[in-house]
Image (spheres, grey):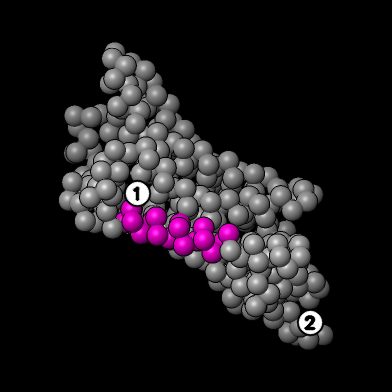
Amino acid sequence: VEKENQSSAQEFILLGFPGNQLLQISLSVVFTMTYILAVTGNFAIIAVVIARPHLQTPMYIFLSNLSFLEIWYTTASVPKAIAVFLGKSKTISFVGCILQMYFIFSLGCTEFFLLSVMAYDRYLAICYPLRYSTLMSSTKCTHLTFLCWVSGFLCMSIHNSLVTRLSFCGSNVINNFFCGADSLIFLSCSDISVVKWVGFLMAIIVILGSCLTTLVSYIFIISTILRIPSARGRQKAFSTCSAHLIVVVMWYSSNIFLYIRVYRYSFFDMHKFVNTVNTIVTPLLNPFIYTLRNKEVKEALGK
Ligand SMILES: *[C@@H]1O[C@H](CO)[C@@H](O)[C@H](O)[C@H]1NC(C)=O
């Protein structure tokens, strides 16, 4: 009986957003345009950092890694979402669903780590300007980036392998536009307490760990900036970290909202809007925030 049940849920249906055909088409158009802009913007950042030797500093290498990550992050969810809105393929196979979930979560973890490493980098640059080049050598920068990617992809693998063991026999309708762990595990008819706890623990470790690193870095950064006597000096120091700060605030606020929602999932469809912010708006805004708030990038892009 169990075998039969399992084989009945080899596919999931992604609901997308409710609404008539016109709304679906408008959504596809908006998602497509935003997606193209986001990918182009992030490619531009990577190209500029590669093309301009004076931008080969840790800060910009981290930034271009972040752009690289954002391209994959948005690519993991948006093209499928557009197909769902257009009604072309509302279904996703079990394996496809698990892979999508794993990619989105691993890239998400990597983003948390990268953002906290970037905060640490700003801390070294602002609090120890004279020793910065030795404290953040290019080897250390490479090691830190490597560590972010590896731990980002390792951290969700236990949780993910637990999800692959769940059996699905009831409803196979996912009320979202991509396969997220939160939507998926609640559809299971197995005991989900272990997988829920592992997910909870990983989220606490990743979110709190990176949040603390970022917060402590910024406490030191701000107290150092406040001690700079001239207003011009303060502004100059702040301008090197303001873009990062905006990106951090956006990323954390949307993720913390999603996370709270998972454990009291009574809000209506608000999570889809926050997911939209996370998967397309943030990847779109990052390059713009960095270009607008950063003279060096602006000049390099102009050239
Ligand atoms: C990411 O960081 C590594 C190591 O610092 C660097 O070699 C690589 O060029 C970066 N990748 C991108 C796409 O910028």
Residue 124 drawn at (x, y percent): 29, 34
Callout 2 amino acid: Asn
The local crowd at label 2, few if under 14, some if 14 to 19, many if 20 or more residues have their Cα within 10 Å, is: some
Q: Is residue 61 left or right of residue 106?
A: left
Write down the quadrant of residue 22 in the picture: bottom right
Q: Secondary structure at mark 2?
A: helix
Is 10 in the magenta?
Answer: no
Residue that mark 1 sits on: 63
Name the mark on residue 5: 2
- Relative depth, front residue between 300 and 81: 300
Which contiguous range is marked in magenta? 30-46
Residue 297 drawn at (x, y percent): 29, 44
- Relative depth, front residue between 163 and 272: 272
Q: Is residue 67 left or right of residue 176?
A: left
- Determine the residue positioned at 53% across, 42% down: 250
Q: Main secondary structure of the magenta part?
A: helix
- Determine the residue positioned at 43% across, 26% down: 219
Placement of 229 over or under 29, stated as above or below: above
Is 34 in the magenta?
Answer: yes
In space, the residues marked 2 and 1 are separated at their CA atoms by 47 Å
Residue 41 drawn at (x, y percent): 39, 55
Q: Secondary structure at mark 1?
A: helix
- Determine the residue positioned at 28% across, 14% down: 230
Q: Residue reaching furthest top?
A: 229
Placement of 54 over or under 79, stated as above or below: above
